[in-house]
Image (tube, grey):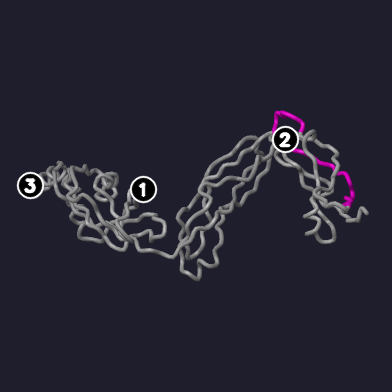
């Protein structure tokens, strides 16, 4: 018993010491490379001279005899050799030592300069991302424009028949309440069964500003009417409400006019047309016009 106890203490002591040893582990790479599978079809054996404890060496030798280790690599670390073959250099692989060999392992040197992986080509296409939003604002605050997504499109991978049915992907609901300042963050994408996406989430930003309202009465006139033709607009005036960013730099009602183009009248159904502003000046976030549709009647002026 004394001999066994002494041997056990000796063994534990020696295994707890650090040694320089060559470790070898088969690695399967996981990486998001556009147009390719996200898992390599082959494994590459990573061998390196490392300094670690005797316990880690025993674990490493046991690991080498088992299934390959899956390691997720940054796509920027993978370089295309040709076709579907990609490689990672030993310099970049140094960032993944603990993922490959485990914690507590200090790298001395890799035995190879690069490691090769094959990522088969997959059926794919790029589609836009559509935000699903639920926004509320504090009084006198509103969005400066639509929400911005980054990236605003993603690559989807699926069977050909499935890809044909996908024209866009959606975010999970972005719910922001009582906004009075700009907002930003990230949101996950809605998953689609049988489909892999190049991104699982996207960033979003929404510009929010305080606004003031300016209401005015404007004349609505015809424009580009050919000679010998008269185009009458009913009603001939409208009420326009401008929402302008605060503080207000100038009154837009002084510079904006509304008209109905004769070309639009010709394309209309029954002479019903929408009025077009001459130019919306900077500072106007949006406007509304009442009525929205005008009746137009063409007459000969001769």
Q: Quadrant of the C terminus?
A: bottom right
- Whichever of callouts 3 and 1 sits on the residue coming sooner in the sequence is 3
Q: Tell me if label 3 and label 2 are in contact, CB under 8 Å.
A: no
For residue 196, the mark is none
C-alpha distance separating marks 3 and 1: 57 Å
Identity of the residue drawn at 86% across and 39% down? 217
Judge left or right: residue 274 versus residue 13.
Answer: right
In the rendered view, would you say 278 is above or below 168?
above
Q: Is 247 in the magenta?
A: yes
Characterize the magenta stretch by its predominant secondary structure.
strand
Identity of the residue drawn at 22% across and 44% down? 105
Q: Secondary structure at mark 2?
A: strand
Q: According to the image, label 1 marks what residue?
A: 76
Nearest-to-viewer mark from 3 and 2? 2
Judge left or right: residue 144 versus residue 121.
Answer: right
In the rendered view, would you say 106 is above or below 210?
below
For residue 2, the mark is 3
Q: What segment carries the magenta color?
A: 230-251
- Whichever of callouts 3 and 2 sits on the residue coming sooner in the sequence is 3
Residues packed near mark 1 inside 10 Å, few (<14), some (14 to 19) or many (20 plus): few
Q: Position of residue 39 (x, y in %)?
A: 35, 60
The quadrant holding residue 68 is bottom left
Identity of the residue drawn at 28% across and 54% down? 87
- Whichever of callouts 1 and 2 sits on the residue coming sooner in the sequence is 1
The quadrant holding residue 206 is top right
Q: Secondary structure at mark 3?
A: helix
For residue 244, the mark is 2
The quadrant holding residue 264 is bottom right
């Amino acid at each position: 018993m004394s001999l066994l106890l002494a041997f056990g203490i000796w063994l534990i002591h020696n295994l707890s010491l650090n040694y320089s040893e060559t470790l070898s582990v088969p690695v399967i790479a996981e990486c998001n490379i556009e147009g390719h599978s996200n898992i390599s079809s082959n494994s590459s054996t990573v061998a390196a001279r490392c300094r670690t404890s005797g316990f880690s060496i025993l674990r490493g030798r046991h690991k080498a005899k088992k299934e390959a280790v899956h390691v997720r690599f940054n796509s920027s670390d993978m370089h295309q050799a040709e076709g579907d073959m990609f490689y990672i250099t030993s310099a970049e692989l140094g960032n993944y030592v603990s993922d490959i060999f485990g914690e507590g392992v200090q790298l001395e040197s890799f035995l190879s300069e690069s490691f090769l992986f094959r990522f088969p080509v997959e059926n794919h296409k790029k589609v836009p991302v559509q935000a699903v939003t639920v926004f509320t604002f504090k009084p006198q605050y509103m969005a400066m424009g639509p929400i911005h997504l980054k990236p605003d499109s993603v690559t989807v991978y699926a069977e050909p028949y499935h890809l044909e049915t996908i024209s866009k992907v959606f975010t999970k609901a972005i719910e922001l309440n009582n906004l009075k300042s700009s907002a930003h963050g990230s949101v996950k994408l809605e998953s689609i069964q049988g489909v892999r996406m190049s991104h699982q989430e996207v960033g979003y930003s929404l510009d929010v500003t305080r606004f003031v309202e300016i209401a005015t009465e404007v004349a609505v006139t015809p424009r580009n009417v050919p000679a010998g033709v008269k185009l009458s607009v009913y009603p001939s005036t409208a009420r326009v409400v401008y929402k302008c960013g605060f503080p207000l730099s100038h009154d837009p009602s002084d510079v904006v006019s509304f008209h109905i183009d004769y070309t639009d009248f010709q394309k209309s159904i029954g002479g019903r047309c929408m009025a077009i502003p001459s130019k919306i000046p900077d500072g106007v976030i949006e406007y509304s016009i009442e009525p929205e549709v005008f009746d137009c009647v063409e007459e000969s002026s001769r």
